[in-house]
């Protein structure tokens, strides 16, 4: 069996690793536009200079050799012939029995007047983006860095530039009332904003960029806000979201087995449009690999929304729902260096936010995924543990009983 995987990100690498574990004799080829295997979660560390390309990798240096995987790095796939079961890279054609498209996602730029006609504008999705941002930010002529978007990617970019030591700290613009509004609540978000402001960053929240202005040579010069303010800008980073990279199979759709309507073709990771999280991409890669090897496995999407952040020594994690609904109960506690909140719906946790101490994040993720009624387990949210689920059956044997929703 010959397996071809397009993409060497979280989903592609997880699939390659799983296929080799399931089938010791299969031919596995990985083709990626990137010439390095790296974690997108670490791009801020690269910009800041804390890690080089090798140090933001997430596989051993001998991963491909040790797993007998042929890797074509720095190679773009031009097209896929699903009828002939061949992948075309320039003048080269690669045949397959099973194909996994794990091409990830690309930065999605909003339709702002003037944005498409200026240069010195970057997203932060790929290593090439981080390389370009670091190079441009090191240029002494760039004195006004503007970042559109104060979510995780926007703060990643700002953090990397702060750690890099640029004299002119970034200005972040977002239409939300607080930073990280999609990931954390106001209390947790304010802790991060305060740290960024302490390190020289500025914010314009509740604001939208309506126009981008450039000079006669097309270089970005300023941004105009909805309030009419025109702000100088000679380096612009856009961090307003991503879109699945599905140019190779624009009409493909996946079923519960991550298989498409094309024979032997699967999609996993951000390219599916199902989730943008790293854990979900890994799980999808593993599920797709099982199905590619003939082991029917459904993707049940148990992994709910999960966000993590670690800026200026403050670690945070949110799992599940961030915003409570009418009738929900909120349990929260805060002390020096720690903030924790659980959203309960009928005694069942549907969301948790941990800041400062995220050591029990996996425990809460399991409770949320399994819809465990913790009100029936313990009289205190914060004292709940796995031990609360044990009981004795009629024979005197310990059994695990989870009071479900």
Image (tube, grey):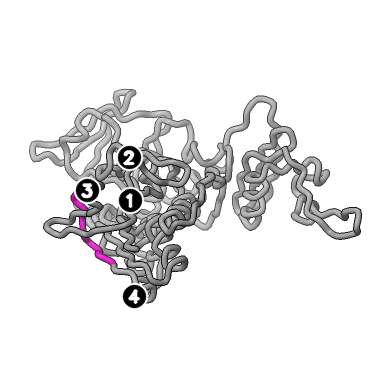
Quarter in which the C terminus is drawn: top right
Question: Which mark is nearer the camera, 4 or 3?
Answer: 3
> Which quadrant of the view contains residue 138?
bottom left
How far across and down, in percent of the image, does residue 376 sit?
81, 42
The disc label shown at residue 101, or none: 1
How far across and down, in percent of the image, does residue 86 sit?
22, 54
Sort mark 3 into few (<14), some (14-19) or many (20+) by Cα contacts within 10 Å: some
Distance, label 2 to label 1, CA atoms, is 10 Å
How far across and down, in percent of the image, does residue 108 sit?
31, 39
Of callouts 4 and 2, which one flags the residue occurring earlier in the amino acid sequence?
4
* Element type where label 2 sits in the image: loop
Boundaries of the magenta span: 71-80
Left or right: residue 247 versus residue 195 is left
Of callouts 2 and 1, which one flags the residue occurring earlier in the amino acid sequence?
1
Distance, label 4 to label 3, CA atoms, is 28 Å
Q: Are the residues tagged 4 and 2 within 8 Å (C-beta)?
A: no
* Element type where label 4 sits in the image: helix
Q: Are the residues tagged 2 and 1 within 8 Å (C-beta)?
A: yes
Quarter in which the N terminus is drawn: bottom left
Sort mark 2 into few (<14), some (14-19) or many (20+) by Cα contacts within 10 Å: some
Residue that badge 4 annotates: 65
Question: At 81% from the left edge and 56% from the top edge, which residue is drawn?
Answer: 399
Question: At 38% from the left edge and 76% from the top edge, which residue is drawn?
Answer: 66
Of callouts 1 and 4, which one flags the residue occurring earlier in the amino acid sequence?
4
Question: At 8% from the left edge and 36% from the top edge, which residue is drawn?
Answer: 216
């Amino acid at each position: 069996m010959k397996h071809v995987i397009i993409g060497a990100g979280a989903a592609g690498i997880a699939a390659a690793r799983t296929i080799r574990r399931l089938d010791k004799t299969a031919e596995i080829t990985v083709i990626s536009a990137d010439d390095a295997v790296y974690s997108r979660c670490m791009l801020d560390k690269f910009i800041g200079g804390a890690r080089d390309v090798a140090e933001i990798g997430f596989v051993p240096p001998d991963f491909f050799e040790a797993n007998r995987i042929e890797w074509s790095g720095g190679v773009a796939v031009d097209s896929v012939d699903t009828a002939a079961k061949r992948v075309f890279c320039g003048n080269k054609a690669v045949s397959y029995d099973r194909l996994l498209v794990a091409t990830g996602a690309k930065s999605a730029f909003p339709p702002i007047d003037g944005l498409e006609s200026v240069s010195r504008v970057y997203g932060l999705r790929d290593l090439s983006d981080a390389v370009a941002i670091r190079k441009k930010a090191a240029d002494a002529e760039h004195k006004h860095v503007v970042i559109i978007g104060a979510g995780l990617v926007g703060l990643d970019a700002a953090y990397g530039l702060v750690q890099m030591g640029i004299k002119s700290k970034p200005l972040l613009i977002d239409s939300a009332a607080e930073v990280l509004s999609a990931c954390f609540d106001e209390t947790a978000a304010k802790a991060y904003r305060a740290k960024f402001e302490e390190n020289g960053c500025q914010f314009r929240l509740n604001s939208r960029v309506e126009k981008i202005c450039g000079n006669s040579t097309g270089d970005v010069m300023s941004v105009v806000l909805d309030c009419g303010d025109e702000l100088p800008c000679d380096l612009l980073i856009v961090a307003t979201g991503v879109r699945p990279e599905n140019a190779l199979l624009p009409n493909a759709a996946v079923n519960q087995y991550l298989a498409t309507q094309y024979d032997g073709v699967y999609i996993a990771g951000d390219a599916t449009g199902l989730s943008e999280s790293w854990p979900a991409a890994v799980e999808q890669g593993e599920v797709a690999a099982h199905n590619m090897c003939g082991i029917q496995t459904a993707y049940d999407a148990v992994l709910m929304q999960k966000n993590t952040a670690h800026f200026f020594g403050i670690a945070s994690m949110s799992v599940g729902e961030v915003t409570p609904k009418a009738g929900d109960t909120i349990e929260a506690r805060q002390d020096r260096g720690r903030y924790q909140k659980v959203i309960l719906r009928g005694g069942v946790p549907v969301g948790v936010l941990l800041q400062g101490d995220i050591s029990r994040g996996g425990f809460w993720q399991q409770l949320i995924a399994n819809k465990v009624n913790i009100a029936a387990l313990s009289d205190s949210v914060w004292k709940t543990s796995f031990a609360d689920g044990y009981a004795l059956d009629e024979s005197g044997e310990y059994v695990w009983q989870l009071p479900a929703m």
